[in-house]
Amino acid sequence: MTASLGRFSFREKPLAVQWAAIVALSLLLAAGLTALRLPAALLLSAIGAAATIASLEGRPKMPPRAFLLAQAVLGGMIAQYIKPAILLEIWRDWPLFVAAALSVIGASCLIGWALTRWRLFPDSTAIWGSLPGAASAMVLMAEAYGADMRLVAFMQYLRVLLVALVASLVARFFAPGGGAAPASFLTQAQSLIDWTAFGLTCVLLLVSAWAGRRFRIPAGPLLLPLVVAATAQDLGLLTIELPRAVLAISYAILGWSIGLRFSRDILLHAFRTLPAILGATFLLLALCGGFGVLLSHFAHVDARPPISPPAPADSTRWRSSQLRPSSTCPLSWPCRRRGSCWSS
């Protein structure tokens, strides 16, 4: 049976069969990850399903325009969280923000540089894979700057899972009521859609994504919609409206686009370097914990928020739906980004 599975290939299967297998496997994995309350379930399941079919010599192709539009939607989603109140909070405590950000970025770059020096990954792949931030955004930007987005995705989303596990343990043992499971993206109620705002949002994102590609801005289909939409929102010119169905489809397209670029050789290389990736990830988590202790001591911030690891933004929505910020936290926004310093 093992031999027959090893010889199984999608190479001769019709494209319709390959896509049906990808969609079915994506739904199955999404249901499992959602049941486990893991972050970025939609994106991770799409990547996993597409990578599985690609490793079995399946070669369906994602239309480039669909990939471009999905990037624009992701930029719009991130822009929703860039509100004037957040910018004001950053301005008030900018030394702490700058110190915290530079510390984490410096540690990440140092770890990525070490992985590159050991020749475990080509070019700047290790650095992009180690950088904190929105995992999907990091993957897309890495491709724009010539890194191997497949290995970057492997490193980033492995860290998403590890961060989720560590954050859950921290919440369970240190935060009152922190062990309660948050609601899933798939099970949260969808509020009524403002169709006018949705139409204007679509036009703005489409035009911005086209301009980003037209003028060859690195990661332009992601970054230009993000900047333009956030600016329009903060100036009161636009209310960004992105229904859950649109976000879910965009996550699936992004995940399939990334996963279909994998091959059996790339997966084998990724698993061969797994011990180094795990070591680098846990080292980064330990360093962030150390930064958190220092921040707690010198800035008099509750120790629990800063100790939380640098969770990519794909997991922010996973935590934020069930929590509200604590009025006693002097650094409400950075704590909020980590899903900490919240009360239930």
Image (tube, grey):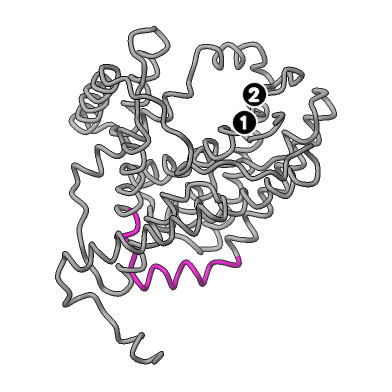
Looking at the image, can residue 7 be seen?
Answer: yes
Callout 1–callout 2 Cβ contact below 8 Å: yes
Which image quarter: residue 182? top right
266 falls in the magenta region = yes
- Across and down, in percent, residue 62 comes to 22, 53
Q: Give the range drawn in magenta.
A: 258-275
Q: What residue type is labelled 1?
A: Ala
Judging depth in this view, the residue of 18 and 160 nearest the camera is 18
Classify 318 as above or below 208: below
- The residue identified by callout 2 is 97
Classify 306 as above or below 79: below
Looking at the image, can residue 218 be seen?
Answer: no
User: How far is the residue under mark 1 from the one under mark 2?
Assistant: 6 Å
Judging depth in this view, the residue of 184 and 71 nearest the camera is 184
- The residue identified by callout 1 is 101
Residue that extends furthest to the top in the rendered view of this protein: 236
Which residue sits at x=28%, y=33%? 221
Give the position of the N terminus as an image quadrant.
bottom left
Judging depth in this view, the residue of 267 and 276 nearest the camera is 267
- Across and down, in percent, residue 120 comes to 51, 64
Q: How many labels does the image show?
A: 2
104 falls in the magenta region = no
